[in-house]
Amino acid sequence: MSVKDQLIKERLPKHVAIIMDGNGRWAKKRGNSRVFGHKNGVKAVRAVTEAAAELEIDYVTLYAFSTENWRRPKMEVDALMSLLVKTISAETKTLNKNNVRLAVIGCIDTLPKDVRVKLMECIDATSQNTGLTLCLALSYSSRWEITEAVKNIATAVKNDELNVEDIDADVISNNLTTQGIPDPELMIRTSGELRISNFLMWQLAYAELYFCDTLWPDFQKQDFYEALMDFQSRERRFGKTSEQLKK
């Protein structure tokens, strides 16, 4: 029996977050530029999106470009932005075919205009789809997101729209860019790095973390199924004891 066939549908995570790491190292191993790795990483995005849609997972969030990535060499950043535009344009038809809705989180205003235009076009074109929501984290970081949430909450208090005593976890969650999206239950990071790199720090509070050595361009459906199988093998206690869960 294949790994996919062993998965228990009722125990699949509703939301999977992925740090797509290893494009540069994958390209370097082949004597090519980092951009070559990013281009080949698109194939892995397509494979994971198709697998998640087939399994009827509700949300997949991909860490596509962090606020810190703006510090990379201009040539690489420009190439990434160009690749993003081409990929979104090319994949819109496929997203609709697979009933996938595109969403985006992050400081979108810092993206080049052509990227923003293509993003909004694809989001609008897929907005009526009812299957998987594919969320791209672009120009995103948790520290930026939480800072913005604090500013919004402080402004609401200043304008007498919110009492300090009423600030709780729900208020904070509702001021994050992921408002309305359930927290990830599983976070996958490829390439062997063992950190979350400023990604969804608030939302990952109770997520299961899965790290694998596979470089992102080599990550395929089978790798995704194995991560899901590992997730289903874990006991999720949320502060309770094993004995309490058995009652």
Image: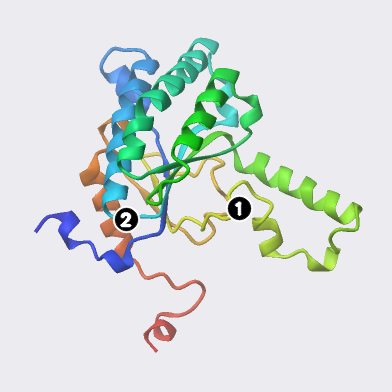
Residue count near mark 2 (Cα–Cα under 10 Å), binned few <14, some 14–19, many ≥20? some
Q: Nearer the viewer, residue 118 or 247?
A: 118
Q: Is residue 166 left or right of residue 127?
A: right
Q: Quadrant of residue 67?
A: top right
Q: Nearer the viewer, residue 22 or 83?
A: 83
Residue at the image point whose x is 72% and y is 65% from the top: 168
Q: Residue furthest top?
A: 75
241 w.r.t. 175: above or below: below
15 in relation to 147, above or below: below
Numbered mark located on residue 179 in the image: 1
Dot 2 or dot 1, earlier in sequence: 2
- 135 over 70 or under it: above or below: below
Q: Position of residue 232 (x, y in %)?
A: 30, 64
Residue 213 vs residue 71, the one in the foreground: 71
For label 1, the SS is loop
Separation of marks 2 and 1 at Cα, in angstroms: 21 Å
Q: Is residue 154 visible?
A: yes
Label 1 CA crowd tier, 10 Å (few <14, some 14–19, many 20+): few
Q: Secondary structure at mark 2?
A: loop
Residue 215 in view of the camera:
no
Residue at x 55%, y 54% (from the top left corner):
203
Name the colouring of the figure: rainbow
Residue at image mark 2: 56
Q: As shown in the figure, which amino acid type bears the numbered disc 1?
A: Gln
- Residue 27: % across, % down: 31, 19
**Which amino acid, by three-letter code, is at mark 2?**
Glu
Q: In percent of the image, x 60 and y 38: which residue is there?
A: 141
Quadrant in which the N terminus is drawn: bottom left
Question: With 246 as the anchor, is 157 left or right in this view?
Answer: right
